[in-house]
Image (tube, grey):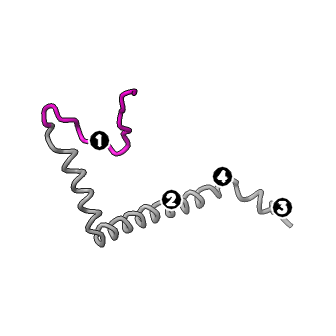
Amino acid sequence: MAYRPALRERVSPHGLLLPVWCVLLVVAVVGFIAIGFLTEIIAAVSSSYEKVVGRRTANASAPRVPKKPRPTVECEIPWRPPA
């Protein structure tokens, strides 16, 4: 009878990583597609969503008027002078 190694000796621990990475990649791709579809559905159903995005895009791309402050950035905290 020939020597037959145990299963854990025959399967390399690194050999199991490839299927795990493949599953994670598929989950990530499906997640991105689902988020994209959800965004498209919201944009198609809600008219206010499109108006807000269009207004922000127009304000951001409009040429600067002299002596007028630039439109605020979404994440910007307005500066207040000390009182």
**Rendered view: 73 above or below 31:** above
Q: Quadrant of residue 46?
A: bottom left
- At mark 3, the secondary structure is loop
As rendered, which of 50 and 28 lies closer to the eye?
50
Looking at the image, which residue sits at the far front?
83
As rendered, which of 35 and 53 lies closer to the eye?
53
Question: In x, y percent, where is residue 59?
Answer: 20, 47
Label 1: which residue? 72
Q: Earlier in the sequence, mark 3 or mark 2?
A: 3
Q: Is residue 77 magenta?
A: yes
Q: Residue at x 38, y 68 (%)?
A: 38
- At mark 1, the secondary structure is loop
Q: Nearer the viewer, mark 1 or mark 4?
A: 1
Label 3: which residue? 3
Residue stretch in magenta: 65-83
Q: Residue at x 39, y 27 (%)?
A: 83
**Rendered view: 56 above or below 6:** above
Q: Residue at x 49, y 60 (%)?
A: 28
Q: CA distance from mark 2 to mark 1?
A: 38 Å
Label 4: which residue? 14
Q: Nearer the viewer, mark 3 or mark 4?
A: 4
Q: CA distance from mark 3 to mark 4?
A: 23 Å
Label 2: which residue? 25
Q: CA distance from mark 1 to mark 4?
A: 51 Å
> Residue flagged by tag 2: what amino acid is it?
Leu
> Residue flagged by tag 3: what amino acid is it?
Tyr
